Image: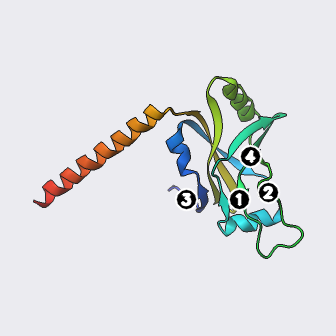
Amino acid sequence: MGKKNIAIKIVCENRKARHDFFIHETFETGLALQGTEVKSLRAGRANLKDSYAVIRNGEVFVEHMHISPYEQGNIFNHDPLRARKLLMHKAEIVRLFSKTREKGYTLVPLKVYFKHGRAKLELALASGKHNYDKRQDLQARAAKRDIERALKDRQRG
């Protein structure tokens, strides 16, 4: 049997995370949201800039993830920057907890998306890059772009 197409609607991405961190492993987690937060997410009104995840009392929470209040909402609107619980298996949480205790590892949200109608967050186990690592990445990207440009020009002529 063929692979079924899975409808994934990306709400927002943290593009800067791949620039600032080495991504070692990624996890798909569920998001525990309040009523109007889901409607705001469906409208694409979220921001992962400066957000991070922490493990408290055996539970994972994402901090500083901004979900704008829903325009048609009323008194039931939520706090845009509240800590939101992430839904993960206990074994994954225990493994992440031990990894984040190691030097230099942190939990960084990469993107928020809808999969089968459920809000999901892609969480990465990452370590920070130094400035020289970032420069090397930029140089490698520029070199690759120059090579592709040269090949393209050669095919034309």
Residue situated furthest top in the rendering: 102
Q: Percent x, y for residue 68? A: 73, 64
Residue in the picture at 67% in, 60% down: 46
Residues at marks 2 and 1, CA–CA distance in whole angstroms? 10 Å
Q: Residues within 10 Å of mark 1 (few under 14, many from 20)?
A: few
Residue where numbered disc 4 is placed = 63
Residue in the picture at 47% in, 34% down: 131
Residue where numbered disc 1 is placed = 118
Mark 2 or mark 1: which comes first in sequence? 2
Rendered view: 34 above or below 124 = below
Q: Residues within 10 Å of mark 4 (few under 14, many from 20)?
A: some
Residue where numbered disc 3 is placed = 4
Mark 3: which amino acid? Lys
Residues at marks 3 and 2, CA–CA distance in whole angstroms? 28 Å
Report the mark closest to the observer, 3 or 2.
Answer: 2
The kind of secondary structure element at disc 2 is loop
The kind of secondary structure element at disc 3 is loop
